[in-house]
Amino acid sequence: MRLDKLLANMGFGSRKDVKKLLKQGSVLVEGVPAKDGKTHVNPEEDRITIHGEELDYKEFIYLMMNKPQGVISATEDKIERTVVDLLEPEDLVYEPFPVGRLDKDTVGLMFLTNDGKLAHQLTSPKKKVMKLYVATIDEPLNKEQIKALESGVTLDDGYETKPATVEVLDEGEGLKIKLGIMEGKFHQVKRMFEAVGRKVLFLKRETIGPLVLDETLEPGTYRELTDEELALLRGEEV
């Protein structure tokens, strides 16, 4: 990779800024000043320092966020605040994007990465990745409604959903339901409950495949995945 491209990608400014940085002799490759941006380097093997600090290079970034209400699952929007707007500058330089989507008023697990291959694996219908949601609904479900959800329901546009898993969490009132689906249609969870005559009052996503929301994360905060979490998400042995 060209040195100037690497530095620009890592957030050290525009190509013009990087060129100035190189001319100043502030960039060292294996201890030797590198002043030519066309110099090819291997960021995973070469020791590169800028102003004496070693460059911590990584190609991909993997972030778990506890999405709050009021932000949308997008990389940019002229009106609404997005999940990407919640990221720190040092993470923004990797240009991560949300994998899948959550409605503006839905909270919980949001996965962001710049790894397109892994993102495709998690969102492809063929992969059948289970996602678990906890929904607070307006009235309890009866046995027939639960059976309908477990068999698959017809949405308002005629789409027939795949079978879901249903667990009643609030045995007293039956208002809190854990629903598992392997699809990601627009407003799908809310529309599935509407299909059986119920309204979702609050919705939270807890899991994406083997990835489980870290409940210590405050709404709107995030962290990088652990090596174990990433391995599980990739389907590797831990």
Image (cartoon, rainbow, N blue to C red):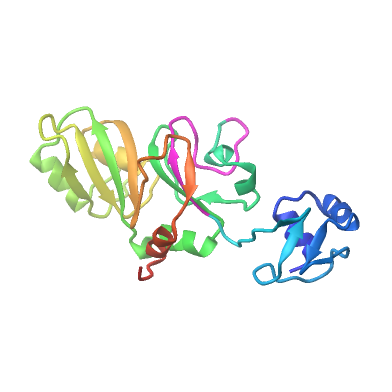
Residue under the point 13% across and 29% down: 173
Instruction: Name the chief secondary structure element in magenta.
Output: loop
Please say whether residue 156 is visible from this viewpoint: no
Residue under the point 69% across and 58% down: 55
- In the rendered structure, the answer to whether residue 177 lies left or right of residue 30 reads left
Whether residue 81 is situated above or below residue 31 in the rendered picture: above
| Viewer-nearest residue: 161 or 228 | 228
Residue 192, by quadrant, is top left
Please say whether residue 161 is visible from this viewpoint: yes
The verdict on residue 45 being magenta is: no
How many badges with numbers are in the image? 0
| Viewer-nearest residue: 212 or 47 | 47
The verdict on residue 78 being magenta is: yes
Extent of the magenta region: 62-79
Residue 167, by quadrant, is top left
Position of residue 11 measured from the top left corner of the image (x, y, whole percent) = 71, 50
- In the rendered structure, the answer to whether residue 124 lies left or right of residue 166 reads right
| Viewer-nearest residue: 105 or 217 | 217
Residue under the point 54% across and 61% down: 116
Of the 4 image quadrants, the one containing the N terminus is bottom right
- In the rendered structure, the answer to whether residue 56 lies left or right of residue 178 reads right
Position of residue 226 measured from the top left corner of the image (x, y, whole percent) = 44, 56
The residue at the far right in this view is 23
Of the 4 image quadrants, the one containing the C terminus is bottom left
- In the rendered structure, the answer to whether residue 54 lies left or right of residue 212 reads right
Position of residue 79 measured from the top left corner of the image (x, y, whole percent) = 59, 30
